[in-house]
Image: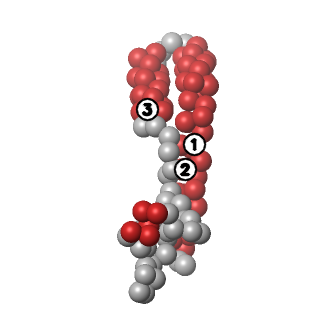
Amino acid sequence: MGLMDDAKEKLSGAVEKAKDAVDEHGDKIDDGIEKLAGFVDERTGHKHTDKIEKATSKAKDLIEKQKSSGKGPKRPTVRDEPTEQDKDDPGTSTGRPPTPGA
């Protein structure tokens, strides 16, 4: 496995963890974004309020988009035994190639 393949695999895992965190804790993340925006706005003397509000809105929209995309399996699962549907169409979802003569 090359360096780029290894990096992609690790990054993919991090992205999945982040998505899971948003699905589970999206409301808390929204609250944190609001608190951070208020803190930064106050510390900058309200000189950049419009930019802070715009960034806050974009961040919250991104969180909402992720939450509304719904949960579900993010990776295909590999089963040890085929389902009834698999028996009709061998090799479709067990993660293994079809058995010859099956």
Label 2 sits on what residue type? Glu
Which is more foreground, mark 3 or mark 2? 3
Residue 8 on image: x %, y %: 51, 64
Q: Residues within 10 Å of mark 3 (few under 14, many from 20)?
A: few
Residue 16's tag is 2
Identity of the residue drawn at 43% across and 32% down: 68
Residue 62 on image: x %, y %: 43, 33
Residue 78 on image: x %, y %: 55, 65
Q: Residues within 10 Å of mark 2 (few under 14, many from 20)?
A: few
Q: What kind of element bears circle 1?
A: helix
Label 1 sits on what residue type? Asp
Which circle's residue, 3 or 2, is located before the other in the chain?
2
Q: Which colouring convention does the figure follow?
A: secondary structure
Q: How many angstroms separate mark 3 from mark 2 (CA)?
A: 16 Å
Q: Are marks 1 and 3 in contact (CB under 8 Å)?
A: no
Q: Are marks 1 and 2 in contact (CB under 8 Å)?
A: yes
Q: Residues within 10 Å of mark 1 (few under 14, many from 20)?
A: some
Label 3 sits on what residue type? Ser
Relative to residue 102, is residue 63 depicted above or below?
Answer: above
The quarter of the displayed image where residue 1 is located? bottom right
Q: Can residue 12 be seen here?
A: yes
Q: Nearer the viewer, residue 98 or 29?
A: 98
View extreme (left): residue: 89
Identity of the residue drawn at 42% across and 37% down: 69
Residue 85 on image: x %, y %: 42, 62
Residue that mark 1 sits on? 20
Identity of the residue drawn at 56% across and 65% down: 79
Q: How many angstroms separate mark 1 from mark 2 (CA)?
A: 6 Å
Residue that mark 3 sits on? 68
Q: Are marks 3 and 2 in contact (CB under 8 Å)?
A: no
Q: Nearer the viewer, residue 44 or 51?
A: 51
The C terminus sits in image quarter: bottom left
